[in-house]
Amino acid sequence: MSRIGNKPIAVPQGVEISIDGSDVKVKGPKGELYITVDQSMKVNSQDDAIVVERSSDANHHKAMHGLTRSLVANMVIGVSEGYTKKLELVGVGYRAQQQSEGVQLSVMLSHGVTILPPAGVKIKVESQNSITITGIDKQKVGQIAAQIRKVRPPNAYTGKGIRYEGEQVKLKAGKSARRV
């Protein structure tokens, strides 16, 4: 039994949902998202809530039940509130600069790295060491944040690099720790 799949999704005011077979459209104040769910899932709208039901108790259907509910819930949150990821640049000489829609990273490489966001995602450089990524699609926001972090992930010995805000980097002991 999927505990997550059985929870109804509360629909806030200002969010419209249209269900046409396996197609689900969610429209809200921040934008519009669209998904085609698995044929075995039934998405129903009931009294300011959305309920996802599965056709049988097969393992595939159980797996798709929770996934479908989570995807639809993420769409509802995205069009009503939106998603935000914040990144920090830690290290001497590590900088970020706004370049039109994208970001230019100077992270001790031989060249600057420019990253452009996909449609529906905005990158804003708050300061030289802080980047904020916003959008309505949770997957796209997380993907572009991961791409930026991948340019220079945190070093395990020094802690320098690009990390998510609040991320704790456990530092390893260097060579001198072995000699004791």
Image (spheres, grey):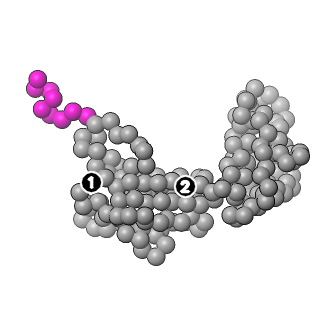
The question of residue 176 being in magenta is answered with: yes
Disc 2 to disc 1, C-alpha distance:
23 Å
Q: Which residue is mark 1?
A: 91
In-image side of 4 versus 47 (left or right): left
Q: Residue at x 77, y 43 (%)?
A: 9
Secondary structure at badge 2 equals strand
In-image side of 114 versus 138 (left or right): left
Magenta highlight range:
172-180
Q: Amino acid at mark 2?
A: Thr
Q: Residue at x 37, y 69 (%)?
A: 97
Q: Estimate the x, y position of residue 25 in percent, counting from the top left.
A: 78, 58
In-image side of 165 versus 122 (left or right): left
| Placement of 63 over or under 86, stated as above or below | above
The question of residue 70 being in magenta is answered with: no
Q: Amino acid at mark 1?
A: Gly
Q: Are marks 2 and 1 in contact (CB under 8 Å)?
A: no
User: 138 and 168: which one is in front?
Assistant: 168
Q: Main secondary structure of the magenta part?
A: loop
Q: Which residue is mark 2?
A: 84
* Label 2 or label 1, whichever comes before in sequence order: 2
Q: Estimate the x, y position of residue 180 in percent, counting from the top left.
A: 11, 23
